[in-house]
Image: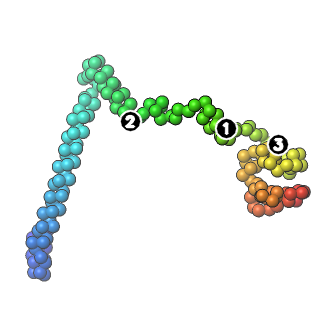
């Protein structure tokens, strides 16, 4: 705070010792932050000093050593796949694969009206729909088929 502002505040009756304490506290916090940042930077510089040397100035053994250090650092960040993946017995694997959905290749057989006429069963019709068709139509629990606008396609007995 500059002198003119202090003199104005003094005339107004501002508590100057309190203001000085605040200012000292702020200055001390700034100095502490700067010193801790500088110490962290010094430690980081010490750790990276080997990497900061240009490749041209390194000997072959120093280059190999640098590669070894980088490889070790990377290995420390990533755990081996054997530790990350669960170990399953054959029974567990069979149970796991049994619960997974089976991939079925689908191909376009025609519009939904033709599929309903051909297969009659709505579950079978759903199995033969392509992904795009299955997104367009909604099969209700009471055996009706609606399109994405809510229009009735099949009422359970006949096509509409």
* Placement of the N terminus among the 4 image quadrants: bottom left
Nearest to viewer (mark 2 / mark 1): 1
Q: Which residue was labeled with disc 3?
A: 109
Which of the two labelled residues, at mark 2 and mark 1, occupies the earlier sequence position? 2
User: Which residue is label 2 attached to?
Assistant: 77
Closest to the observer, 63 or 98: 98
Direction from residue 38 to residue 113 in the image, left or right? right
Q: Earlier in the sequence, mark 3 or mark 2?
A: 2
Residue 4 visible in rendering? no
Q: Residue at x 15, y 60 (%)?
A: 27
Total residue callouts: 3
- Measure the C-alpha gap from mark 3 to mark 2: 51 Å
Q: CA distance from mark 2 to mark 1?
A: 35 Å
Q: Indicate which disc residue 36 carries.
A: none
- The correct choice, above or below, for 97 with respect to 5 in the image is above
Local secondary structure at mark 2: helix
Quick one: label 1, few (<14), some, or many (20+) residues within 10 Å? few
Where's residue 100, x and y in %?
65, 40
Q: What residue did someone put label 1 on?
A: 98
Mark 3 → mark 1, Cα distance in angstroms: 28 Å
């Amino acid at each position: 705070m500059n002198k003119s502002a202090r003199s104005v505040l003094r005339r107004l009756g501002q508590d100057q010792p309190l203001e000085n304490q605040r200012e000292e506290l702020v200055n001390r916090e700034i100095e502490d932050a700067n010193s801790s940042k500088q110490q962290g930077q010094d430690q980081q510089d010490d750790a990276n000093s080997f990497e900061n040397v240009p490749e041209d100035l390194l000997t072959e053994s120093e280059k190999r050593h640098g590669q070894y250090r980088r490889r070790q650092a990377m290995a420390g960040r990533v755990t081996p796949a054997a530790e990350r993946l669960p170990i399953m017995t054959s029974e567990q694997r069979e149970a796991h694969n049994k619960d997974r959905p089976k991939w079925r290749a689908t191909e376009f057989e025609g519009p939904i009206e033709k599929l309903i006429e051909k297969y009659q069963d709505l579950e079978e019709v759903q199995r033969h729909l392509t992904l795009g068709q299955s997104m367009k139509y909604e099969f209700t629990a009471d055996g009706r088929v609606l399109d994405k606008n809510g229009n009735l396609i099949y009422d359970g007995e006949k096509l509409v």
